[in-house]
Image (cartoon, grey):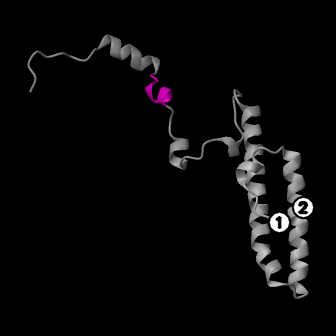
Amino acid sequence: MPKVKAFELRNKTSKDLLGELDEQKAELQQLRVAKVSGGAASKLAKIKIVRKNIARILTVYGQKQRAEAKKQWKGKKYLPLDLRPKKTRAIRRALKPEQLKAKTQRQKTRESNFPKRMYAVSM
């Protein structure tokens, strides 16, 4: 079987992808049997191609699943962990900009009662 192209796989439905995956796995099984029974060198070289095809199919299938999940969860209050942006742990734990700017009632009162002094001459 020839090398499968990822852009061609993206046009297929999920069912088609799973069908293609089953075909590739069956072919890989046959090639492995041929390898054990002393098959031709051309069949042994095909094993790598089929393995890579399986990987491509699984990658495209995963991307489709992720895109559907993102579409489903869009606009909701919470996102599943695997759909959230990874970033770094420190950035994820940091306060959001609106939380940083937030002031208590006491801070607001003090600022209004004791504003910063303005001087005409600066150092």
Which of the pair 93/3 is nearer the observer? Answer: 3
Disc number at residue 23? 2
21, above or below 64, in the image? below
Mark closest to the chain's N terminus, 1 or 2: 1
Q: Where are the magenta residues, as a range?
A: 97-103
Q: Position of residue 77 (x, y in %)?
A: 69, 28
Name the element at disc 2.
helix
Q: Residues within 10 Å of mark 1 (few under 14, many from 20)?
A: few
Q: Amino acid at mark 2?
A: Glu
Residues under numbered marks 1 and 2 in contact, where contact means CB atoms less than 8 Å apart: yes
20, above or below 72, in the image? below
Q: Is residue 17 magenta?
A: no
The residue where tag 1 is placed is 1
47, above or below 101, in the image? below
Q: Which secondary structure is most common in the magenta stretch? A: helix
Which residue is at 64% across, 41% downward? 84
Q: Quadrant of the N terminus?
A: bottom right
Which residue is at 80% across, 79% downward? 42
Q: Position of residue 13 (x, y in %)?
A: 84, 43
Q: Residues within 10 Å of mark 2 (few under 14, many from 20)?
A: few
Q: Is residue 99 magenta?
A: yes
